[in-house]
Image (cartoon, coloured by chain):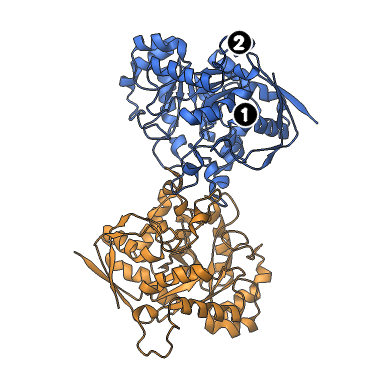
Chain colours: A blue, B orange
């Protein structure tokens, strides 16, 4: 049996939702990750200091961090930091100064592009956005971007490259993260602009549109951005397996209740949080690149975001793991199937 | 109110299934169409004379043609001819001679490419296929082809063009119908080879992959071949609206029970038979091409296949039609929505 140890795994793009769903999914991330960048696309979106603080409190409650505040020795799975984000709007510098210690990023959504993004950016009016983006640049707040246009579904990300380009050129000190990239076009941008970074999901390293719609239609593999072509996946795999220093893991794990996935109109999102480390070990091991996983899963994110997560050690082995059929009311990727690696211990 | 009359509408690509499903869907086609080319991908596939005759009998029973054989005056919806097809295998000339009067086409499926196609062609071995295809050519049996490779889902049809080319060149007198074409690449083939023809569905004139997977995932719009890019739909629309003489309507209406469409793995097929004429009137009218619909819906098919359908006159008007939520256990395209045209009478 082969084992592999990961230190302080970070999930730099995570949807924890709210309410009952938050209670279901947050402990699944806090168990094996040291921290996660939590997306702000709630209803209503997270746009105030109060909302950030309150949401962080609800997350910490959901993972049991606040259950027994007097207890000195925290459990390993209490060592989980929800790195908070705001939903992008044009904010004042004064506001950003007051909120900057509570967040690490502001997440920009083009309006209507994915789940709960109706309040997003309607047009990329640089003059209107400049004060906000300059303040973010000065205050060291990362701009996290869902980079898709409203064009044809297979072209949306590639079409967005000109907007990344405009942002990167106009705000050269602003760190911009191209979230959950799915295309060769986005991978190529990493070399072109110093201030462009990227997250990559586990599922986009594993699937193409063929898996979603090539045989049967698989609603549980349907996500935004949609999985693309084989050559796109190859480009993503290459930078992930090499742990390109500008690339980080971000699961984009996005839970929906089963009835919203298996219906006439299926919601977008793949749920991978509880199986992400196992999948990545299997994938990196298969390609003989296990030694690079530490950088992809944590070190690169620490460097890019300047994070110092609390210690957590996750030991995995290549013992097969039977993925549960459900976590609460959420069907995970590979539900009921065996994947190659198991989490043996978390300390 | 505008009205439009269609004479002897033909659906040159129809799945009627068998058993209870046949009883449900066959009357919906026989009501408004004069005839349809019935696909042979049953379980097991239709590969013998006996199976053809028995299936045709079950179809005629399902549409009520056999209910009262003594009755002299048949109802209008009894005037429906199921044009039968065989499932392609390598057949002997002797066999094809005995079956030729019972069928108009042989349908070729690459193995495993769509519903119930497991017994299809595994490799296009021209030497092995030559006797069959030459006999078909001599006997005037049309070769109907599901033209997809097992490549990446968006490329499958375009990749198949070289096989169409090989067939068209090697069997210049064989009429080959490229079924349910979805790409600009296939449209372009029509001009290149005299013996290549095509059917086009209603849904591929209306949707692209955006409608299937660009917003929510829509299982009831999922079909094979999958809907392609906007420029592909434009190319299809162009030849359909112009009623290109080598192009015919074929609905590829493919019913599945609701539970097979709204599930973890959704079966491929869009159910349009009962709304196809209404949709086409709306579409052709919108583009100012209503006068071309008669050729697309019937005349071209009569010419290509040499058919003489019984008289049927369908009068439609631009009065909105509320599509039922269900036909039996089958959810149609546009279920519960209004479409622009209604069937007013059938004589």
**Element class at badge 2:** loop
Above or below, B82 against B296 in this view is: below
Q: Tell me, for residue A240, which label it has, or none.
A: 1
- Name which residue lies at 57% across and 72% down: B171
Q: Position of residue B175 (x, y in %)?
A: 51, 73
Q: Quadrant of the N terminus of chain A?
A: top right
Q: Whole-percent x and y of residue A48? A: 37, 17
Please identify the quarter of the rendering in which residue B70 is found: bottom left
Do we see residue A172 in this rendering?
no
Between A292 and B269, the residue placed more toward the observer is B269
Relative height, residue A181 to residue B297 (above, below): above
Identify the residue under disc 2. A71
Q: SS of the residue at dot 1?
A: helix
Is residue B283 something that shows in the picture? yes
Q: Nearer the viewer, residue A98 or B70?
A: B70
Q: Position of residue A322 (x, y in %)?
A: 69, 39
| Left/right of residue A337 with respect to residue B105 in the rendered view | right
Measured as percent of width and height from the top left, residue B342 is found at 28, 64
Quarter of the C terminus of chain A within the rendering: top right
Give the tally of numbered discs.
Answer: 2
């Amino acid at each position: 049996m082969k084992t592999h140890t990961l230190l302080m795994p970070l999930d730099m793009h995570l949807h924890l939702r709210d309410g009952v769903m938050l209670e279901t999914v947050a402990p699944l991330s806090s168990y094996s990750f040291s921290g996660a960048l939590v997306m702000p696309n709630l209803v209503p979106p997270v746009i105030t200091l109060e909302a950030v603080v309150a949401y962080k409190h609800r997350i910490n409650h959901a993972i049991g961090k606040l259950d027994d505040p007097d207890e000195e020795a925290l459990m390993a799975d209490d060592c989980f930091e929800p790195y908070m984000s705001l939903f992008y709007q044009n904010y004042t510098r004064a506001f950003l100064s007051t909120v900057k210690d509570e967040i690490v990023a502001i997440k920009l959504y083009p309006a209507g592009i994915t789940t709960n993004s109706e309040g997003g950016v309607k047009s990329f009016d640089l003059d209107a956005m400049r004060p906000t983006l300059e303040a973010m640049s000065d205050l060291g707040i990362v701009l996290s971007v869902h980079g898709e246009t409203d064009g044809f579904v297979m072209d949306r990300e590639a079409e967005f490259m000109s907007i990344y380009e405009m942002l990167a050129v106009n705000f050269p000190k602003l760190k911009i993260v191209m979230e959950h990239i799915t295309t060769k076009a986005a991978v190529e941008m990493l070399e072109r602009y110093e201030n462009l970074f990227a997250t990559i999901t586990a599922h986009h390293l594993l699937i193409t549109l063929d898996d979603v719609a090539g045989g049967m239609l698989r609603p549980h593999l349907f996500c935004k951005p949609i999985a693309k072509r084989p050559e796109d996946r190859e480009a993503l795999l290459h930078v992930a397996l090499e742990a390109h220093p500008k690339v980080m893991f971000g699961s984009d794990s996005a839970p929906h209740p089963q009835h919203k996935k298996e219906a006439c109109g299926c919601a977008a999102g793949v749920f991978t949080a509880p199986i992400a480390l196992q999948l990545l070990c299997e994938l990196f091991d298969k390609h003989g690149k296990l030694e690079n996983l530490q950088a992809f899963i944590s070190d690169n994110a620490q460097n890019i975001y300047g994070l110092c997560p609390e210690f957590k050690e996750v030991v995995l082995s290549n013992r097969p793991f039977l993925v549960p059929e459900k976590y609460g009311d959420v069907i995970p990727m590979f539900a009921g199937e065996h994947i190659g690696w198991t989490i043996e211990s978390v300390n």
